Amino acid sequence: MQIQVVLYQSSRWMRKLETGLARVDSINNPFTVALWDNDPGTSLTADAGAGGLPDGWRYVASEQGNPGFGQAHNELAQLAAPECEYLLLLNPDALPFFDCLDQLVAVADANPDAALIEAAQFPFEHPKAYDQATLETYWCSAACLLVRRAAFDGLQGFDPALHLYCEDVDLSWRAWLAGWRNLYVPDARCIHVTHRYDLGKSRALEISKGAVGGLYLRRKYFGAKQVERYFQSLRSALSPRLVAAIATEFEALPTLTVDRRNDPHITLEPEGFYAPRRW
């Protein structure tokens, strides 16, 4: 297994990440770690170049600027060994519990038609719905996500047009349409630092990129009427200047449409959530 982490000004998380992964039980599922830095030139680059990473870890400084979260994961996936069956996509601010990998792999092995197998976030679990009998869920968050490599390759990875946010929703929807299943494993847990903890973090990028991603998903899967409806909601909630910037970035993206075949897993309701809520 390859655990892959996309970094962006993530130096403050590295010590916790190294310590946490050292405590993951890897007897049944040994792993390597691959890091891709979308903002090289920081102290992290110097530490990695000086051999400051644990054995079995690989560091890659992006030579193409910041290609985005999804494209960086696509690049990391190409570095996995040929025999690697699973990829674990992990945020730098997320730490798997000691048995998380074993839980995820056990479910993946028992469900060979599952492409994406998501871990539950702790202490604030994501409230999107999942079927408690089949574990099927509408889409899988990429904060701590086991990916069957054959499925990832077949789906051609993340859509590189989505720079940040909504790329995991898009990948999940394409997996459903390709005949794969997406699963959620409540017993496989990871600690994830959400905005409740990271109080000093600006939400401006999340708002703007999330809006661009939301527009892109609507055009790709639902058409122009849903795009305009979403623009109306943005105009009522955001400043004209920010909406104009979002519109400029969105219009520069490729115009790609997908036949969603009225798949029930592909939904815009509730607004901005892309799945029914459990609470």
Image (cartoon, helix red, strand yellow):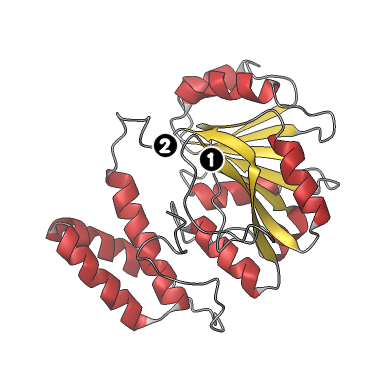
Rate crowding at label 2 as few (under 14), some (14 to 19) or many (20 or more) other CA atoms within 10 Å.
some
Q: Is residue 237 among the parts visible in the rendering? A: yes
Q: Quadrant of the image for the C terminus?
A: bottom left
CA gap between label 2 and label 1 equals 9 Å
Q: Residue at x 34, y 78 (%)?
A: 226
Q: Position of residue 253 (x, y in %)?
A: 40, 67
Along the polypeptide, which appears first: circle 2 or circle 1?
1
Residue ID for mark 1: 121
In the displayed structure, would residue 17 be above or below residue 247? above
Q: Nearer the viewer, mark 2 or mark 1?
A: 1
Foreground: 277 or 46?
277
Q: Is residue 62 among the parts visible in the rendering? A: no
Relative placement, left or right, of 187 versus 203 is right
Circle 2 sits in a helix, a strand or a loop, which is it?
loop
- CB under 8 Å between discs 2 and 1: yes
Foreground: 67 or 11?
11
Q: Amino acid at mark 2?
A: Thr
Residue ID for mark 2: 194
Answer with the quarter of the image where residue 5 lies: top right
Relative placement, left or right, of 102 versus 174 is right
Q: How many marks?
A: 2
Q: Amino acid at mark 1?
A: Gln
Relative placement, left or right, of 149 versus 76 is right
Circle 1 sits in a helix, a strand or a loop, which is it?
strand
Relative placement, left or right, of 238 versus 24 is left
Rate crowding at label 1 as few (under 14), some (14 to 19) or many (20 or more) other CA atoms within 10 Å.
many
Q: Position of residue 96 (x, y in %)?
A: 62, 33
Foreground: 106 or 68?
106
Q: Quadrant of the image for the N terminus?
A: top right
Q: Position of residue 88 (x, y in %)?
A: 67, 43
